[in-house]
Image: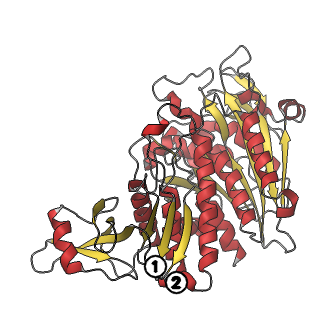
Amino acid sequence: MTTLHLSDGIIKDEILVVALSHKKSIRDGKANLVIESGDIALDSKKLLPILADMGATGKADEVIKIPGITTRLLVFTGIGEHKAVIEDETLRRAAGAAARGLSGSSSATFSLPTKKLASLEAVAEGVLLGSYAFDKFRVDSLAQRHPSLKAVTIHSKLAGSAGAKDALKRATIIGEYTALVRDLINTPPSHLNPESFCKEFTSLVKKVGGAGAGLKVSVMTHTQLKAKGFGGITAVGQGSANPPRLLHISYRPVKVKAKKSYAYVGKGITFDSGGLALKPAAGMEAMKSDMSGAAAVCASTIAIALMKLPVAIDCYAPLAENMISDNATRPSDIITMYGGKTIEVLNPDAEGRLVLGDALVKAQENKDLDGIIDVATLTGAQVVALGTRTAAIMTNNQEFSDHFFAISKTAGEAFWPMPLPVELRASLDSAVADMANIGERMGGMMVAGLFLKEFIAPELPWLHLDIAGPAYNEGEPYGYTPVGGTGVALRSLVALAQSAAIS
């Protein structure tokens, strides 16, 4: 991972990165470029004509490189329309785009506008997120790849201020654990299954200090799950040669009282073939990403522990492979979920809600929760409704949802509130069981949310985050977002814990 440093002194790197914006002239309406070089003075009169000749626009994701004056290379990263106050997410994205564009370089100094610590932290996050690369399985082709930017110095007058080092430390934790989530999502099912997922986090908890860091981990095997009545997880995983698991990571702050207590539950389908409702071959390779929610909640719990936040977290990852065999769950099978509710499985490809239902009930055995959040690549309908870059929030508590929505904006993740229309609930009725696992096709994202709501105590604030589109980028990279796993939801889950810590 790229190493970060702070400085407000002489620039020692051969590469300097600054920002570039644009604003329209009142007279002629033409776009004029504005160099945003933070706390470093540059000769705009000399540089702007060069940038204009090169066709620079200052738009987001644009990266322009020219020979430097006092450095070997001067890099301009676009931040869009010129504003008196630049949003932290704009800086995060611009830093990420520049970091991507500098792969193969050994070091660079980033001097973007950082008038407050939150902006400095956003730049640091953007650098780390944008520098990410997944080369674990490259052998012969590795030599053809440019390695990630090795080291970055963030130039700012705030470098020596109180809190700057803490901001850099937080950004480093966010960068490291987002990279972990991305790595897990990008890892193929030949190398990641329920058991190896559990081993990864069991090893990681031990590595970061285990009980000394306030962390404990436990794993329920498939035989334990079956014996204890976890019918949802068992039904989804029984068709696979790789049996299901339920991973539990708990965090309790050390030597301080927790100000809030949350449960994080993440869908962990390490590969989703659709089961006996087999998916089309085209696009099925992306179903290695169906454990994105589990990776996000587990990694965020460890990040929260490393930040030593005074918040208690119970993290649950129900893990299974949804495969085809003579043991696979059949359409019309009836299963009994943990807690006793019976479900008619009309569609084995609507499996995520089944594993989540079990884990949500289990998580609520902690009666001291202030809220419960589930994170899942749950429905294709989410992508239809909100596209590939915006995730959905559904809730039984508007205040909790509004708070999380505001927090997610601060964290730089795109979520949007969606309703849970009462009239859609009847479509989940079954003639032979307590409920069916699918209902009305139109509004399918919200129907899935209504299914999960049936497993939530009415008085417990609950959020359902459907991240189906944003979790896995099948298009071109942009900003700090690579191709493949994105790590979405981790920053917002950490930010929620941070907000509770200062409340």
Amino acid type, residue under disc 1 in the picture: Thr
Amino acid type, residue under disc 2 in the picture: Leu
Which residue does the image show at 18% across and 61% down from the upper left?
Answer: 54
Which residue does the image show at 68% across and 57% down from the upper left?
Answer: 300
Q: Are marks 1 and 2 in contact (CB under 8 Å)?
A: yes
Quarter-of-image position of residue 499: bottom right
Give the CA separation, mark 1 to mark 2: 8 Å
Q: Is residue 419 above or below residue 495?
A: above
Camera-side residue: 346 or 237?
237
**Disc 1 on helix, strand or loop?**
loop
- Which disc, if any, is residue 157? none
Which residue does the image show at 76% across and 34% down from the upper left?
Answer: 195
**Disc 2 on helix, strand or loop?**
helix
- Which disc, if any, is residue 114? 1
The C terminus: image quadrant: bottom right
Report the mark closest to the observer, 1 or 2: 2
The residue to which callout 2 is attached is 158
